[in-house]
Every structure is written in C-alpha cells, then in structure tokens.
Image: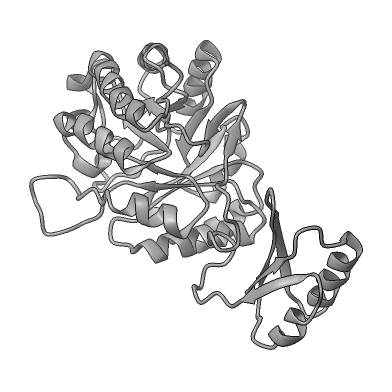
Amino acid sequence: MIIILKNGAPKEEVDALCRGLEAQNIRINEVKGAHTTILGLIGDTHKVDMEAIEAQEIVESVQRVQEPYKGVNRKFHPENTVINVSGSLIGDGNVAVIAGPCSIETEEQIVDTCMQVKAAGANFLRGGAFKPRTSPYSFQGLRDEGLKLFLKAKKATGLPIVTELMSLSHLDLFDDVDIIQVGARNMQNFEMLKELGKCNKPILLKRGLANTIEELLMSAEYIFAGGNPNIILCERGIRTFETQTRNTLDISAVPVLKTLTHLPVIVDPSHATGKYELVEPMSMAAVAAGADGLIIEVHNNPQKALCDGAQSLTPKHFASCMDKCRQIASVLNKKVGTLE
C-alpha cells in the first residue's frame, strides 16, 4: 500500500499518521520528492482501513500495491536510486563501467589489467578471488590471497572494487571491498541475502540463469527488507534452448526492470554471451536499452587466462568497445565511464 500526501502536509500530522500505522506493525518507507511525499507501507496491510486514511486532510490518495515486492517497487519510490561509492555513481543517468579480469591470478596480471581499464574510462574494478565453477577440477580462485592482490590494484588505481562473495563465512574478509557481488548461483541463497541486508555496503545482485524478473526483484527485496537499500541489479543472461551463445542476454529485462523498480540496472555482456566478439555489440545494445552500467571482463592476456578467457576482452579491445558505447550514449545525452 502507498499513501500519497498532499503538498505541504504539516509534519506533526504526518508523524501522527505514521505512529498510528506503526502501531499496527507496519513499517513505513517515506520518500520525499520535489512536490510529492509518498509513504510506502511494508507489512501485512490487509487490515489497514484505506477509507479512514483517505479521509484525513493531509492525504491525497491511497493505493494498494499488488506486487509481492514492496521496498524495491518503483511505486513506493518513484525517483531512481543512485548508489554513491567513494564519489563514483551508479544510477545517476549515465553509464557506469565495471571492468577487470574474471579471476585474480597474479599481482602483475591484476594491477596491469586494472591500470589499463582505468585508462580506458572504467569507474570500478572487477575481479574474482573466490570463483564458483561448474567443475570441481577448475581453477577456484586465489581466495583470501586474491583479495590481498585486488586491494593492491585498488590502491594503484584509486578505483572502487567489486568482487563476489561465495559464502557468509568469508564476509569478514570483505571489509575493504567496496561492492559485494552476489552471483547467479546465490541469487536465491536467502540466508545470505538476509545477512547482506544488515551490511552497509552496496550489493550487486546478479539474475539467476533460470530466474524470472519477479524472482530477481524478490531476492532484492530480501536485502532491502534487512535494511540495506543500496542494491544494483545485474542482467547477465538466462538459459534458453539456444546453443550459439553461453546464455541468452535478455536485453528487454533492462527497460522492464526500469519500469518496475527504482534500483539501478546494469548488464554483463561477458557472461551473457561467452564470446569476446559479442561483448562489444551487446554492450552497445545495453547502453541503447537504458542500462545504468556495464560489467565487462578484461584480461591483459586472455589466451593464458585461468578462467573465461574466451569471453574476455583485451585492454585494447575494451578501449574500442568503450568508444563505440560512447557514440551510442551521446545520442541519449549520457556519459559512459569516466571519459567524455
């Protein structure tokens, strides 16, 4: 349920309304816009008397919300959420760029690659220390040692870092990580999501490979309900019957999500396609579709990468990809990454 207040409603009357609702075990999410204030009611609102609320002089209208996700619903929060990470923004109307290797392998590899993606205009760095792999015999990442190397890249570039959390038992190691990524395999790990709701760090939540958009939003709701509103949604491709790509990039998910939620939406063209030659056109498509950001795999020597080399761009190719994306963004009066 949402309550739209009249412009200029006295604060004491609004506070009294909120106290009455909270006495009914209703949590209130207040959103103040330039001309309108909205009270989003979260909880069991079936017994709330809509007519009694509408009768109050300060109330413009009352609407019931049918969707099961409340906090992340755009109806509760019409204005876009902007995530600010050390001055770098996601969701401000421009296209943020997160780039780096799939996995952290050596200090030279991670620092060199990150320096080059920064030079090409990346706002954030990505790199995997703990790697979820289908095969138990594949490279699983350097784990805590990989995080230490990633922090060296962070110091060398001055850019915020994004890396994936595989288990809550590792959370203490993520103190200096700027954005915690929840991978596709953990999208419905509800115990993890609940715990991350208590976290004061932004969470990058990837869509599961066989999950609907509503299921993605319900997973985001777990984090939001825990008290953490700093959530970034990521479309990274879903599993279909098509075999020519690793997954199928659901580019329509971007405008659909932008309609349904106030949270920023980014796209991962690397995991979506699994082929480096498709990353550039899919990145351009994501920008055209209105994505708030891109997360792209870049490796300084993809042929020798220990993980996902086939979908990784070289730094040179990444710079070219950014140039093409900027051409698309210019039509929309947007900026891509840190370069004009």
Residue lying at 35% horizontally and 25% vertically, measured from the top left:
330
- Mark count: 0
Q: Position of residue 267 (x, y in %)?
A: 34, 41
Image quadrant in which the N terminus is located? bottom right
The correct choice, above or below, for 76 with respect to 100 in the image is below
Residue placed at 48% from the left, 17% from the top? 153
Q: Residue 316: x and y, percent?
A: 25, 13
Query: From the viewer's perspective, is 15 left or right of 328?
Result: right
Relative height, residue 191 to residue 53 (above, below)? above
Closer-to-camera residue (117/71): 71
Reply above or below: 72 against 118. Answer: below
Residue 189 at least partly seen? no
Q: Position of residue 66 (x, y in %)?
A: 51, 77
* Res 76 → quadrant: bottom right
Residue 31 left/right relative to 160: right
The quarter in which the C terminus is drawn is top left
Judging from the image, the colouring scheme is: one colour
Query: In terms of depth relative to the viewer, which is nearer, 307 or 57?
Result: 57
Residue 329: in sight, yes or no?
A: yes
Residue 37: name its quadrant.
Answer: bottom right
Taking the view exactly as shown, the residue that stands out farthest to the right is 12
Q: From the viewer's perspective, is 144 left or right of 60?
A: left
Question: Looking at the picture, does residue 147 appear above or below residue 60?
Answer: above
Please provide percent x and percent y for residue 203.
53, 45
Q: Quadrant of residue 308?
A: top left
335 and 275: which is toward the camera: 335
